[in-house]
């Protein structure tokens, strides 16, 4: 590699997860290939508090601890973008959990980067 050459990094900018109508838990997403990321809530959302959970088996999830880049649970607003706690990337999977059940299916955009 030449000095000053750009470092190529993996990015997955078009990933989404969904919280079903009447549900609280999003579908899971793989975190083990990435080092950090953010999520963006849709313009319509029920509740203002969301928790990121992590898992190694995609079945049993535990709340991620808060860390230097943010709290968990996260106080959120509709259409806002928020950091995923770094601890989520030490496990294989993560999901986003709403405190309130959703009145309709909600799609949450993810931006994951290695």
Image (tube, rainbow, N blue to C red):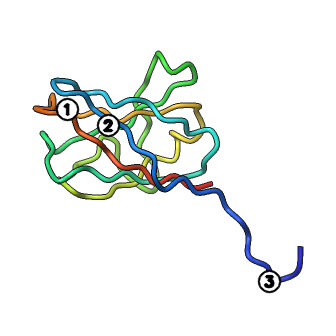
At a point 51% along the width and 47% down the height, the residue shown is 86
Q: In this figure, what is the number of numbered marks?
A: 3
Q: Are marks 3 and 2 in contact (CB under 8 Å)?
A: no
At a point 40% along the width and 54% down the height, the residue shown is 83
The answer to whether residue 62 is left or right of residue 92 is left
What residue would you read off at disc 3? 4
Specify the farthest residue to the right.
1
Secondary structure type for disc 2: strand
Q: Image quadrant for the N terminus?
A: bottom right
Q: Quadrant of residue 5?
A: bottom right
What residue would you read off at disc 2? 51
- Going from N to C along the chain, the mark reached first, 2 or 1, is 2
Q: Image quadrant for the C terminus?
A: bottom right
- Going from N to C along the chain, the mark reached first, 3 or 1, is 3
Q: Are marks 2 and 1 in contact (CB under 8 Å)?
A: yes
Residue 66 in percent (x, y) is at: 41, 44
Secondary structure type for disc 3: loop
Residue 80 in percent (x, y) is at: 25, 58
Pair 3/2: label in front: 3
Residue 95 vertical placement versus 23 (above, below): below
Label 1 environment density (alpha carbons within 10 Å; few <14, some 14–19, many ≥20): some
At a point 54% along the width and 36% down the height, the residue shown is 30
Secondary structure type for disc 1: loop
Residue 48 in percent (x, y) is at: 16, 45
Compute the Cα span from label 3 to label 1: 46 Å
Q: Are marks 3 and 1 in contact (CB under 8 Å)?
A: no
Label number found at residue 99: 1
The answer to whether residue 101 is left or right of residue 34 is left
Residue 101 vertical placement versus 31 (above, below): above
């Amino acid at each position: 590699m030449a000095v000053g050459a750009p470092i190529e990094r993996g990015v997955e900018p078009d990933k989404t997860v969904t919280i079903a109508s009447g549900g609280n838990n999003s579908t899971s997403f793989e975190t083990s290939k990435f080092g950090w990321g953010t999520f963006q809530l849709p313009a319509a959302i029920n509740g203002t508090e969301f928790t990121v959970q992590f898992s190694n088996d995609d079945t049993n999830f535990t709340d991620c601890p808060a860390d230097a880049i943010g709290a968990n649970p996260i106080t959120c607003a509709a259409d806002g973008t928020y950091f995923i706690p770094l601890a989520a990337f030490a496990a294989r999977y993560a999901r986003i959990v709403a405190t309130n059940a959703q009145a309709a299916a909600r799609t949450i955009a993810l931006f994951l980067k290695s």
